Amino acid sequence: MIPGPIEFAPEVMEKMGQPTISLLAPAFIESFGRCLEMMREVWQSSTGQPFIVAGSGTLAMDMAGANLVEAGDNVLVVSSGYFGERYAELLKRYGANVTLLKAEIGNVVPLEKVENELAKGGFKLMTFTHVDTSTGVLVEPKPMAELALKYNVLSILDGVCSVAGEEIKQDEWGIDVVITASQKAVGVPPGLALMVASQKAMAAWKNRKSPVSNYYSDWGNWLSIMQTHEARGISYFGTPPVNLIQALEVSLELILKEGLENRFARHQKLAASFRENLSGLNLKFVTENEAVRANTLSTFYFPEGVNGPDFLKRVGDNGVVIAGGLLTEIKTQYFRVGHMGIVNEEHIERTANAIEKALS
Ligand code: PMP
């Protein structure tokens, strides 16, 4: 019950364990092509360009940044935790002039503040985190995307802790790049960096004045690979993670079979149920404001007098693995519980019981 890697469906694990076939095998090319098609459905972007690359979520962040930023570009990073701050550091490596708007711990940056900053003008790009896994804060993407459109700024949504768990309508909301990684709500073991880039983002990349300074991340090396596989053809740039991509096909099928609306509703229900189960303990939320609580994880301060490592160990002794803190300022003061993917009501109850027992 940590916020990634999560528990994976047995069908997904079974696929992972199959003998690795050739990257040129027709069956693999079919899987790769299917994955790209299904990503468009899950991201709700029929017009965007999907990318599947071996790497973690940080590579997905890196790839979006490397392709869209040129030295001297002004970028607005709207941060609601650890991963927003990481994005600011990452983009500086590509020569961006980064303006970092940091939320108060456990909250979002108010929209007015974002708008005030954008209204100053000159920004090429804005990044924001859908669910920051360090704080459990959920940012509503739609109004943020509206601001990006209003001020003609490209937008990158870090959806590592949200894609396939929280609602995202990439085309309808007009978000330029939505990135994620395999190990969270997408439901595949760690190792895949995933993203869908809008045609506007692809045009911005094509119109760059300088070459992309990161060889592995350069869309120029990957675009034809994605296009060829979607057309069920053979092409090679770097050896694809065959088993992970086949497992992704299985997981995306499961996600679409459940139905996106059902899946988002189930995550909402489980999040509410988990918090309800714990309500008798009067734990203090890191996300004090109910309106900004994610459905994919919950974050609580340790009660006063409770030693964090001891508590986590006792929860573990009761058969449930949860996570400690991550955000530097409060790292030792809180814990995080993931509830995404194949999680069900029984897991929720067992987790709440383990927490209660450990505390008592
Ligand atoms: N962004 C968010 C919101 C995340 O939760 C994470 C991982 N926890 C990352 C980015 C980075 O992903 P990875 O650890 O796979 O590099």
Image (cartoon, helix red, strand yellow):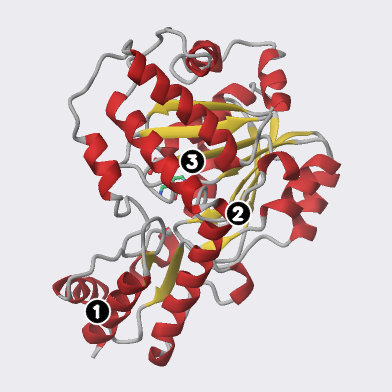
User: Residue 76: in sight, yes or no?
Assistant: no
**Helix, strand or loop at disc 3?**
strand
Q: CA distance from mark 3 to mark 1?
A: 30 Å
Report x, y in % for residue 226. 51, 18
Relative to 77, residue 216 above or below: above
Q: Pointer 2: what residue?
A: 167
The amino acid marked with disc number 1 is Ala
Q: Residues within 10 Å of mark 2 (few under 14, many from 20)?
A: some
Q: Is residue 255 left or right of residue 203?
A: left
Task: Indicate left or right for 85 with 16 as reference.
Answer: right
Q: Which residue is mark 3?
A: 180
Q: Secondary structure at mark 1?
A: helix
Q: Position of residue 101 (x, y in %)?
A: 65, 52
Instruction: Indicate the amino acid at tag 2.
Output: Glu
For marks 1 and 2, give the one nearer the viewer.
Answer: 2
Numbered label attached to residue 29: none
Identify which residue is drawn at 68% across, 34% down: 176
Q: Amino acid at mark 3?
A: Thr
Q: How many other residues sit within 10 Å of disc 1, few (<14), some (14-19) or many (≥20)?
A: many
Residue drawn at (33%, 68%), measured in percent from left and top? 332
Spatial CA span between label 2 and label 3: 14 Å
| Disc nearer the start of the sequence (1/2) | 2
Check the picture and name the quadrant holding the C terminus.
bottom left
Q: Please say if 139 is above or below 179.
A: below
Q: Is residue 314 visible?
A: yes
Is 157 rendered above or below residue 70? below
Who comes first in sequence, dot 3 or dot 1? Answer: 3
Q: Residue 106 location in percent, x, y? A: 54, 68
Is label 1's Cβ within 8 Å of ligand 1? Answer: no
Is residue 79 rendered to the left or right of residue 15?
Answer: right
Q: Residue at x 50, y 71 (%)?
A: 269
The local crowd at label 3, few if under 14, some if 14 to 19, many if 20 or more residues have their Cα within 10 Å, is many
